[in-house]
Amino acid sequence: MSQSFGEKVLHHVSQVPKGAVLTLVLTTLLSWGLNTDRSTAFAIAQQVSHDGSTTQLAQNSNIQSNVLPKRIINAVLRDASKRSNIPVRDLQITQATSKTFSNPCVFKFGEVCTREFKPVQGWEVNLQVKKDSWTYHVNKSGSQIILDPKVSASQPTAMPKALEAIILRDASKRSQTPIAQLKITQATQKTFGNPCEFKFGEICTKEFNPIKGWEAVVAVGSQSWTYHINDSGSQLVLDPKATSK
């Protein structure tokens, strides 16, 4: 029967004086190409050296890549809380799976992706939001947190006041109507598949280059104008079908 990774390391450790264990284990971990970084290998080696403990070595070598880091847990919960207007304490992560996404398109929930292999190491995280289940993709460092667009488009939440103000100012300028006489009647948080869709393109490619933002409907007299605005408010587009006065 072939030896496991832990058994191989333990065999080497048992033959070496305690004072030399740290150097040996660290060298062994890295030279065997263990799927971990140097900091993780060093932590494992230190534990064996300082504790003289060998029973937890095999466990630690496996657990390192399968436990969702606390910083990512907090980041996902904060994002979901902001989107849903539900306190973090009322949200629950139900499942977290370590994954290698084949390319950035797949990582960003693209429905039509090339077969390019440009892997993104990260996590797929499922979150319970009231009666709904939200799915996130998060890269290993936690710098990218992507919510499944099918989820974000269907969840009611309040548009930030700063974005409302940008839209109303634009509508007022175009229609020559005081802001006090304008009203946003509907606002839906959306992830537009690409810039073409964001700009109300009628014939768009299947390119997946998402823009997170909002679709807002403004009552202008007897008319309804539809706007698309991105999350930062730096891009605002009025539906070309809307008729200005």
Image: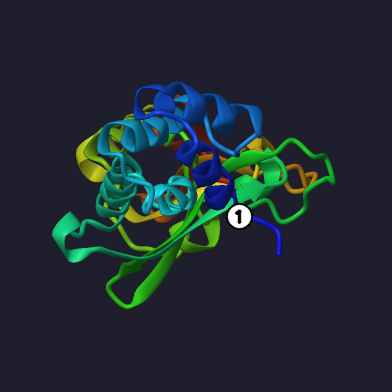
Q: Which quadrant would the N terminus be assigned to in this image?
A: bottom right
- Three-letter code, disc 1: Ser
Q: Looking at the image, what colour scheme do you see?
A: rainbow
Residues 128 and 176: in front is 128
195 to 111, vertically: above or below: above
The spot of residue 232 in percent (x, y) is 39, 29
Q: Which residue is mark 1?
A: 4
Is residue 201 in sight in this rendering? Answer: yes
Residue drawn where x is 42% and y is 54% of the image: 59
Q: Residue 121 sits in which quadrant? A: top right
Residues 9 and 196: in front is 9
Residue 214 vs residue 106: left or right? Answer: left
The spot of residue 235 in percent (x, y) is 49, 28
The spot of residue 166 in percent (x, y) is 33, 30
Residue furthest out toward the bottom: 131
Is residue 240 in sight in this rendering? Answer: no
Residue 135 vs residue 76: left or right? Answer: right
Residues 177 and 210: in front is 210
The spot of residue 48 in percent (x, y) is 36, 37
Residues 60 and 197: in front is 60
Residue drawn where x is 32% and y is 47% of the image: 79
- Categorize mark 1 by other alpha carbons within 10 Å: few (<14), some (14-19), many (20+): few
